[in-house]
Amino acid sequence: MAILLLLLVPVIAIALLLLFGKWKNFSEKISVVSSLIEVIIGVYIVQQVLSTEVINYSLYFSINALNALFLGLTVFIGLIITLHSIGYFKEELKKEMLNEKKLREAYLLIRFFLLFVYIALLTTSPILMWIAIEGTTLVTVFMINLFNRKTDLEAAWKFLIINSIGLLLGLLGTLLFLAQGASQGEVLLQWKDIMNVNGVLNPESLKLAYILVFIGYGTKIGLVPMHTWKPDTYNKAPLPTVALLATVLLNVAFLAILRFTMVVNQEIGATFTSQLFIFFGVLSIFLSASIIYTQKNLKRLLAYSTIEHAGIIALGFGFGGIGILGAMLHILYHSIAKTALFLLASNIVVRYSTSIIASIQGMIKVLPITSILFLLSILFIVGLPPFGMFFSEFYILLSGFGNNIFVSGFVLLLFVLVFVGFLKTGMQMIFSEVPEGIVKGEANYWTLIPVGVVVIVMLIGSIYLPEFVMQLVTEATDIIQNNTL
């Protein structure tokens, strides 16, 4: 019943926004109320999962520790972004970057996006998951073009074309998985149905299907070389909505790949899938590290940082063993830290009216609170001890040095390059002289308080993870290691 309620809340919010969105401040209020209710229901569902392991609702919706972890992150990030958006969009209204109609559209798109994500997270059907993720693609196109500039439209088209091609490959791979069951006289509607025909699936067909799925959903993640949409999209879309793409959507796409990975691992072992994860993971880290060091645009810098961390997560799943635990922790820490960075970047870009790093100077005097939070988030995202991401990366590299010392050593060198690049950029932006004509002072409390909460959660989580969070992470890791969908 709770699963149904979680799906109904954004639907009701969407209906209310369509009917009464023209009322003054109604869009903001209904969005906040919807997010709060979703958090309450999400927390309740997670608690139920921790006590009963699996919750089923009808044939097509179910939740265990693996998707419960992603769900908990989604409802939390959804609330934070909704709250931050109130202040952010007010500032953009003042600058006439959007009007009241576009403002209502923005809140509507966020609710649509979260609805599709909830469906993708909770469904037991590979086809329904694909449809829901394709739904996020269509919503994102309108998000990118929210400010209605020519360059925004170009970025939206690029996003649509690349992601649609990727998802078509993902659909083809999914159909190949399902078709193998049909060849054995089985009707495969859910992942557990595919798992139940253990031993009769053709290994070569499985490999081809998995490669198509990996490339398809890897496009959504932004793994190199399927990453080309990310820098333009992140540069043009409103930053609060970009935060959804960099965290929530990335997590959902990884979940899709992991579900197919467990099927393949059960049938032919983990060697084949591990090789793909490691190859694309190292490629993504290498390209991102090279570009981060010389990047001149803040939004694009964060785009390549997201690609890098997607590669790190993929590497953890590829190395296996304790690397999988590291990957799950990295998903948790990256989701929180990248939400903070994008929301802080929105404060910076709004104040300086640019994302060019050379033009963003003297932040400590212009945006003192944002600057402190931004510096802490940078130190966290580069994995500096004792921050949480250091430990997740440590587990991944520890597993890697036990399996492939050369790959792990190379990746460690790339981490150093990213650290130097990020720190150089951060120091340049924060501690330089203030340019002429820049108004000093934070925008408003709505842009500060939500991101402040995220940074506090990020810092506390570095030294102490609540017992229920660790239980979720360890149970999710066990599900992946034991191939128990």
Image (cartoon, rainbow, N blue to C red):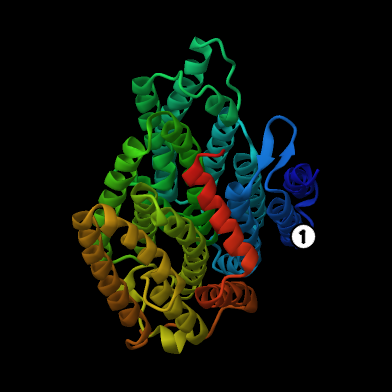
Q: Quadrant of residue 422?
A: bottom left
**Residue 468 in view:** yes
Q: Amino acid at mark 1?
A: Val
Give the residue drawn at x 39%, y 25%: 206
Residue position for label 1: 33
Q: Position of residue 469 (x, y in %)?
A: 60, 63
Residue 444 as seen in the image, left or right of residue 360: right
Q: Of 156 and 101, which appears nearest the observer?
A: 156
Residue 178 or residue 246, whichever sits in front: 178
Q: Position of residue 423 (x, y in %)?
A: 31, 77
Report the quarter where the C terminus lies: top right
> Considering the numbered disc 1 on the image, is that residue within a helix, a strand or a loop?
helix
Please name the residue shown 35% across and 84% down the image.
435
- 149 w.r.t. 412: above or below: above
**Residue 244: x and y, percent?**
54, 55
Mark 1 crowd level (few <14, some 14–19, many ≥20, 10 Å Cα): some
